[in-house]
Every structure is written in structure tokens, then in C-alpha cells.
Image (tube, helix red, strand yellow):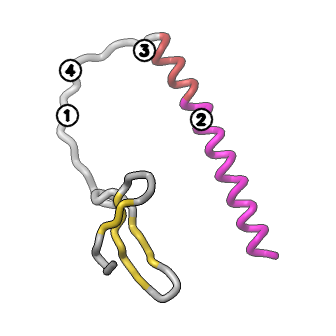
Amino acid sequence: MEVGAFVELEDGLEAEVVDITDEKIVLNANHPLAGQDLHYDVEVVDVRDPTEADLANEKKLDEEHVALFEELNRAEKREEAQAKA
């Protein structure tokens, strides 16, 4: 294995080897376009009112985002407590 090589992870994703030391191997699994500005040229061809299914899905996504945000806050507080200990 060498820096610059790509390895397949257990979940099927690929990651680039970015550093190798005696203690660890550092991988970068970001998408190749991560961090780059992307520009799109689009044309809106139709606009419609949301359906009941659209609204239900939006509510579900909002609930999932709130739960994720709360979990991230809990994890951050645990890390802060561990750093102080």
C-alpha cells in the first residue's frame, strides 16, 4: 500500500490513502468534487403545488433533521466533557 493508492472499504466505498505512518493509515473518502465550487445551468420547466405526499415527506425529513441535530449536540457535549476529564 502506498500514498495515492485507492482502497475499497467494507461498505463498498473507495478511499484514497493520504498518509502512512508506523501507527496509522489515513484515508480520504470524500467525493472527488468535495470542496469544489459547482456551477449549474438549469431551466425551470414546470411549477406545481406540493402534493400531500410531498408535504408528508417534508415533515418526515424535518423530524429526521431535528433528531440528527440533537444527537450531534449530545455527541459534542460528550466530547467536551471527555476533554475536560
Most common SS among magenta residues: helix
Mark 2 vs 1: CB contact within 8 A: no
Magenta-highlighted residues: 61-85
CA–CA distance in space, label 2 to label 3: 20 Å
Residue ID at (45%, 87%): 21
Amino acid at dot 3: Pro
Amino acid at dot 4: Val
**What secondary structure is marked by label 4?**
loop
Q: Residue furthest bottom?
A: 22
Q: Earlier in the sequence, mark 2 or mark 3?
A: 3
The percent position of residue 81, horizontal first and vertical second, equals 78, 68
Task: Pick the quarter of the image with the N terminus.
Answer: bottom left
Would you name the residue on which mark 1 appears?
Answer: 42
Residue ID at (50%, 80%): 24
Mark 4: few/some/many CA within 10 Å (<14, 14-19, 20+): few
**What secondary structure is marked by label 3?**
loop
Amino acid at dot 2: Glu
Instruction: Point out which mark residue 50 bears.
Output: 3
Would you name the residue on which mark 4 appears?
Answer: 45
Q: Earlier in the sequence, mark 1 or mark 3?
A: 1
